[in-house]
Image (cartoon, rainbow, N blue to C red):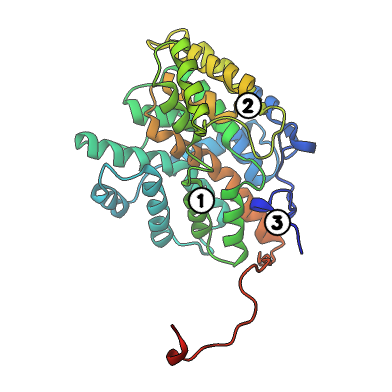
Amino acid sequence: MNKKIGGLAGVIAGETAICTVGKEGLGLTYRGYDIRALATSSTFEEVAWLLIYGQLPDRRELQTYREKLMRLREIPAILKQLLEQIPLHTNPMDVLRTACSVLGMLEPEQNTHRAEDIANRLIAVFPGILLYWYHFHQSGNRIHTQSDEETTAGHFLTLLQGDKPNPEWRHVLDVSLILYAEHEFNASTFAARITASTESDFYSAITSGIGTLRGPLHGGANEAAMELISRFKTPDEAERGVRTLLENKEKIMGFGHRVYKISDPRSDIIRPLSQKLSEKAEDGYLFAISERIEALMWQEKHLFPNLDFYSATAYHFCKIPTFFFTPLFVISRITGWSAHILEQRRDNRLIRPAANYIGPASRTYPLMTERA
């Protein structure tokens, strides 16, 4: 009998030249570039170009690309009308998933809408889609979805907050988008590749990714982490509260990782950025609470924080509502999903794994009169 493999752990499901988490889960590279170098020296738009087109852009290419993304930010009128009909209590992930499907009908993939163009369109338009829906239902305001911000991070904050963004917040959000952009064969990326392997359209593959990321076991950990951290007013209170949760066998989100075994290199990058923001935040004490929870989780469970844990407070200190944390993940990960869809298409084979049947042995079909 074949050994049961929980969640396909350790199974090689394909080949990729886009990203690796490194030998035995150490490190993280995008097309060979270490994540620390990218987070320190690049912008999200540079990383988007790298993932989609295969190499880092030169200065002219980057400027042209930024200008292109800026031109692609406008939302079709029909889609705006639909967004106005979606209730405010809707999960924002459902808003993005639905909007992606609608765009697939309004701007279908064909010779005039190449896959790379669709990827760029989605990167550019998703912040506006999310925030047009949000502001309309919050205040009745039909916001303009253009801004003079060249970066995706600055554009998102401008639309969210209605003013030129705090430069430090813009930088932190930009770095976080780089960190979330790609992560090998994670669940949503694999779902997108499966859809692409059927020769379905680009939008369907991205929609598969969004739907998969919506699940709390994949996306949403930063939202859950923020909910936990914000329960407490002091580190001591946090320690008592988390100890009780652990005693009750409750899962603490934002710790450990399916792939990394020692630490998450992305957490080491976002953590000091969150700490710096906390020094000027009204509720900066939340960072100290995060530190105490981190220390306790290591002491009791030998679990390290992953990217989601300190991203939570970093986003919070930038005054981003908690329910936008996972949609920001989408806005970033479109780049990685797109790169994988393109790679799958270049050497495609339908992804169709086998299953180990554990049901009943062959049985004789009973007539209705013979059934109890």
Q: Is residue 261 above or below residue 83?
A: above
113 or 143, which lies in front? 143
Give residue 305's quadrant in the image. Answer: top right
Rendered residue at 66%/36% (across/down): 57
Q: Nearer the viewer, residue 9 or 310?
A: 9
Q: Is residue 265 above or below residue 16?
A: above
Q: Which image quarter is the C terminus in?
A: bottom left
Spatial CA distance of label 1 from label 3 is 23 Å
Query: Mark 3 and 2 residues: CB-CB less than 8 Å, in contact?
Result: no
Q: Amino acid at mark 3?
A: Lys
Q: Which residue is mark 1?
A: 212
Q: Mark 1 vs mark 2: which is more N-terminal?
A: 1
Q: 88 or 246, which is in the foreground?
A: 246
The quadrant in which the N terminus is found is: bottom right
Badge 2 is on which residue? 301
Q: Residue at x 28, y 42 (%)?
A: 89
Dot 1: few (<14), some (14–19), or many (≥20) neighbours within 10 Å?
A: many
Residue appearing at x 41%, y 45% in the figure = 93
From where the camera sits, is residue 265 visible? yes
Near mark 2 (Cα within 10 A), the count class, few <14, some 14-19 or many ≥20, is few
Callouts 1 and 3 close, C-beta under 8 Å: no
Pointer 1 or 3: first along the chain: 3
Q: Position of residue 63 (x, y in %)?
A: 56, 33
